[in-house]
Image: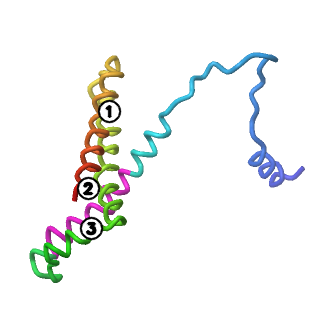
Amino acid sequence: MTERSMTERSMTERPTIERPKGERSTAKPSNEAFFWLLFSAGGVVAAVLIPIQLFLFGLAFPLGWLPQPSYEHVIALARSPLARIYLFVLCSLPLFHWAHRFRFTLYDGLQVKHLNEVIFAFCYGGALLGTALAAYLLWTI
């Protein structure tokens, strides 16, 4: 076999774990991948969408670089379903990004892994509370 065909073959084959017949894996299913997904999505929102909002409403409109929308126009825009979804994502995903980052900062930086359950509940509970508050406020606009 040539070197190239061995490499292609090894990339397509999946390694298998040999277990005695009838023995089950003892690995517990983890929800960690879901929280990493929220972390990365929140990071993208925080890095891309929040700076756009800050530029528009913090610089461009107040300094007159762009024509300032009226209050009625902004409220009408915020009441549309697509804008509500955008604002919900803009508010909620960075909270989960914060929760995940703060959780691992406490674990690794302050070495408080013995408080795993308390930190988990505090961080993600705070993100859930903020998300629920954002949903309520967007629902009542």
Residue 27, above or below 53 = above
Q: What stretch is highlighted in magenta?
A: 42-60
Which residue corresponds to mark 3?
52
Membership of 45 in magenta stretch: yes
Which residue corresponds to mark 1?
103
Q: What residue type is labelled 2?
A: Leu
Residue 66, above or below 83 = below
- 20 or 141, which is in the foreground? 141
Compared across the picture, whether 50 is left or right of 116 comes to: left
Residue 139, above or below 73 = above
Q: Which amino acid does label 1 sit on?
A: Arg
Membership of 41 in magenta stretch: no
The disc placed on residue 50 is: none
User: Upstream in the sequence, badge 2 or badge 1?
Assistant: 1
The x and y percentages for residue 97 are 34, 45
The x and y percentages for residue 83 are 32, 66
Q: Residue at x 35, y 38 (%)?
A: 100
